[in-house]
Image: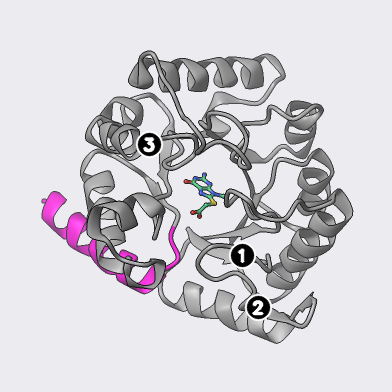
Amino acid sequence: MGILNVTPDSFYDGGTLFVGQSVDKSKLLKRVEAMLDAGADLIDVGGESTRPGSDVVTTEQELDRVVTAVDWIRQHFDTIISVDTSTPEVMIESQKAGAGLINDVRALQRPGAVVAAKATGLAVCLMHMQGEPQSMQANPQYFDLLAEVETFLLKRIDVCAEAGIPKSQIILDVGFGFGKTLDDNLRLMRNLKRYCDLPFAHLVGVSRKSMIGTITGCEVGERLNGSLALAYESLCQGAKILRVHDVKETVDIVKIYTALHSG
Ligand code: 8Y7
């Protein structure tokens, strides 16, 4: 899954698709084409940065950024478009524009989100987060991290199933870096198999995240090697979707993993 940030302020590539205040269509399509050529199977379009301290985005802004991008991508490429959103209106309008997956870091907890997601008929990725993006890294605390993350995900699956979303359309994600200390992130990675063994595809997003910076001392631009190491570990433990900035490099390690583990 290649990351496409249509935000001016994302931590790695924020603003790179903008000319002035607006998203540049040809820059965006070139970025998508490059990720697809490199082997991406999905493109994850996000219009709201969840970086702590990032700008608050109105529904109108998010609709404008995300739905426009989905529309452009659909017109030019045959790929699965994922929308990184927690906003019911964005889910509905993105589906009409051709999206194939809802990626919600809030696991459909916003009012109206479960009903909207069900109405779209799309697959949904449910991610664990403690708190809200603005404050989640202030003081994350768990009594029993591994059990709490699993219980949360199972509860959200139940809520979705009760609303009529088929279990076969649900993807899970432990949510690396979302209300977690370095120690929490490492413990989740060491125990990722536990979550991948649940009967749902598991998505992992660790690309260039601060846990890599903390371990290696590298700034965000130098975190590719760390990202690939964690991506490989995720594959070994059973992850099925890797959400990444660096598609070519990640596809290479997926090929190595696949060659080693087939036959
Ligand atoms: C994740 C994510 C981000 C993740 C899923 C970043 C939108 C922060 N991270 N979605 N989104 N999983 N499912 O560093 O880990 O890219 S945004």
- Give the residue displayed 77% in from the left and 82% down from the top: 20
Q: Does residue 6 appear to the left or right of 39 in the view shown?
A: right
Magenta highlight: main SS: helix
**Position above or below: 213 against 123:** below
Q: How is the image coloured?
A: one colour
**Position above or below: 235 against 135:** below
Label at residue 17: 2
Residue depth check, mark 3 versus mark 2: number of the one nearer the observer: 3
- Residue 161 pos. (x, y %): 63, 18
**Position above or below: 250 against 31:** above
Q: Does residue 45 appear to the left or right of 55 in the view shown?
A: left
Give, as a single range, the part of the protein colored magenta. Answer: 244-263
Helix or strand or loop: what does disc 2 sit on?
loop
Amino acid carrying label 1: it is Asn
- Residue 27 pos. (x, y %): 65, 84
Helix or strand or loop: what does disc 3 sit on?
loop
Amino acid carrying label 2: it is Leu
Amino acid carrying label 3: it is Thr
User: Are dots 1 and 2 in contact, CB under 8 Å?
Assistant: yes
